[in-house]
């Protein structure tokens, strides 16, 4: 396996894990945001629909970026020691 194949594998792996993690983060942040809107009067008064959507999307995007970066770096470290990639 050459450098290009290892790079493509790491990017693919990072994308898959990041999509899964961001899906979970989207569900959790949506449930928490809607729960806060329902039970905390301050949130209902001070955060409009756009703000609520931004909370969910920021949590989702942040999770995607962090997970993909960590997964790609971990995969790169794993392939760095692989003698088949070095040749």
Image: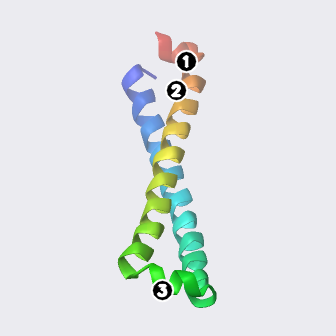
Q: Residue at x 43, y 39 (%)?
A: 11
Question: Mark 1 = which residue?
Answer: 80
Residue 8 image-quadrant placement: top left
Near-viewer residue (7 or 45): 45
Question: Mark 2 = which residue?
Answer: 76
Pointer 3: residues within 10 angstroms few (<14), some, or many (20+)?
few
Q: Position of residue 60 (x, y in %)?
A: 48, 61
Of tags 3 and 1, which is closer to the observer?
3
Is residue 12 positioned above or below 28 on the image?
Answer: above
In the picture, measured across the screen, residue 64 lies left or right of residue 42, that is left
In the picture, measured across the screen, residue 41 lies left or right of residue 12, that is right
Determine the secondary structure under disc 1: helix
Determine the secondary structure under disc 3: helix
- Which label sits on residue 45? 3
Residue contact at pointers 1 and 2, CB within 8 angstroms: yes
Q: Residue at x 40, y 81 (%)?
A: 48
Work out how far the residue at label 3 is from the one at label 1, CA to CA, in angstroms. Answer: 53 Å
Pointer 1: residues within 10 angstroms few (<14), some, or many (20+)?
some
Q: Position of residue 69 (x, y in %)?
A: 49, 39
In the picture, measured across the screen, residue 82 lies left or right of residue 13, that is right
């Amino acid at each position: 396996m050459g450098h290009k194949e290892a790079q493509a594998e790491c990017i693919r792996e990072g994308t898959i894990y990041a999509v899964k993690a961001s899906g979970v983060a989207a569900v959790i942040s949506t449930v928490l945001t809607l729960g806060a809107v329902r039970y905390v009067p301050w949130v209902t008064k001070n955060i409009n629909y756009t703000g609520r959507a931004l909370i969910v999307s920021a949590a989702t995007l942040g999770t995607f970026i962090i997970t993909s970066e960590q997964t790609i770096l971990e995969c790169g470290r794993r392939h760095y020691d692989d003698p088949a990639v070095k040749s």
